[in-house]
């Protein structure tokens, strides 16, 4: 099976940790989305997944209209819950919650006040990914940077900080569904 992962386009609130906040796309983000739909509509994708937030659902609905594939909203692929840091910039987080950064630097554990841990994110994303892999169908997940990092960790190992996805970036993995996701080829 082939798994395509796409990060949503640029949001109307760039440079902020939007997490669970339902922000729309900027004009540039809409262009990124439209360009990606043209590219991806040529691929043998059977199902598109999004998160229920408009920044992923816009692309999924456009893809579904262009290809007539199934569209499933799966909130296991929603972005990390940033808790009290939701909608803040990195500078605002450093100023308001310096303990978040210092704790992370000391322990390697990232925990936003009243938010979700990276471990919890990886666990829920991994379960969703296993379910998609078990279908054996070529699928597209339109999602968020934290989720894409978790997917890379699940498929390739390594650490959360090791991976990053630009807005609108697409990843492609050829997977062996009989081994729960062993990568046979990556683009």
Image (cartoon, rainbow, N blue to C red):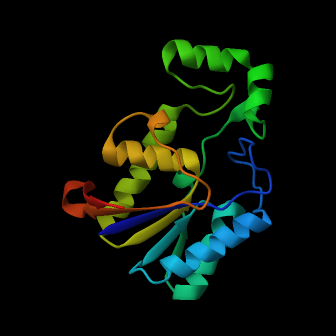
> For the point 68% across and 45% down, which residue is it?
19
| Number of marks present in the image shown | 0
Residue 86 is drawn in which quadrant? Answer: top right
Where's residue 90, x and y in %?
72, 32
Left or right: where 92 falls relative to 147:
right
Q: From the image, which quarter does the N terminus lie in? A: bottom left
Image height of 69 relative to 160, above or below = below
> For the point 45% across and 84% down, which residue is it?
42
Q: From the image, which quarter does the C terminus lie in? A: bottom left
Residue nearest the viewer, comparing 46 with 75: 46
Where's residue 79, x and y in %?
60, 48
Image height of 148 relative to 38, above or below = above
Residue 91 is drawn in which quadrant? Answer: top right
Image height of 67 relative to 22, above or below = below
Left or right: where 75 falls relative to 17:
left
Residue 33 is drawn in which quadrant? Answer: bottom right
Where's residue 99, x and y in %?
68, 14
> For the point 74% across and 22% down, which residue is it?
94
Farthest residue, direction left:
178
Where's residue 109, x and y in %?
51, 22
Left or right: where 13 falls relative to 101:
right
Image height of 120 relative to 183, above or below = above
> For the point 50% across and 82% down, which residue is it?
41
Residue nearest the viewer, comparing 21 with 66: 66
Residue nearest the viewer, comparing 187 with 132: 187
């Amino acid at each position: 099976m082939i798994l395509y992962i796409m990060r949503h386009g640029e949001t109307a609130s760039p440079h902020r940790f939007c997490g669970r906040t339902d922000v729309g796309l900027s004009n540039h983000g809409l262009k990124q989305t439209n360009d990606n739909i043209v590219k991806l509509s040529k691929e043998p994708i059977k199902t598109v997944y999004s998160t229920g937030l408009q920044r992923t659902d816009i692309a999924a609905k456009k893809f579904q209209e262009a290809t007539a594939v199934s569209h499933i909203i799966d909130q296991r692929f929603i972005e990390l819950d940033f808790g009290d840091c939701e909608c803040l910039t990195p500078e605002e987080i450093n100023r308001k919650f310096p303990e978040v950064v210092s704790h992370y630097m000391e322990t390697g554990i990232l925990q936003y006040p009243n938010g979700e841990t990276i471990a919890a994110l990886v666990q829920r994303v991994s379960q969703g990914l296993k379910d998609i892999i078990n279908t054996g169908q070529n699928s597209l997940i339109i999602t968020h940077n934290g989720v894409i990092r978790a997917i890379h960790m699940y498929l390739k190992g390594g650490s959360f900080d090791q991976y990053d996805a630009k807005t609108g970036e697409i990843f492609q993995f050829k997977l062996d569904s009989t081994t729960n996701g062993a990568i046979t080829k990556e683009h």
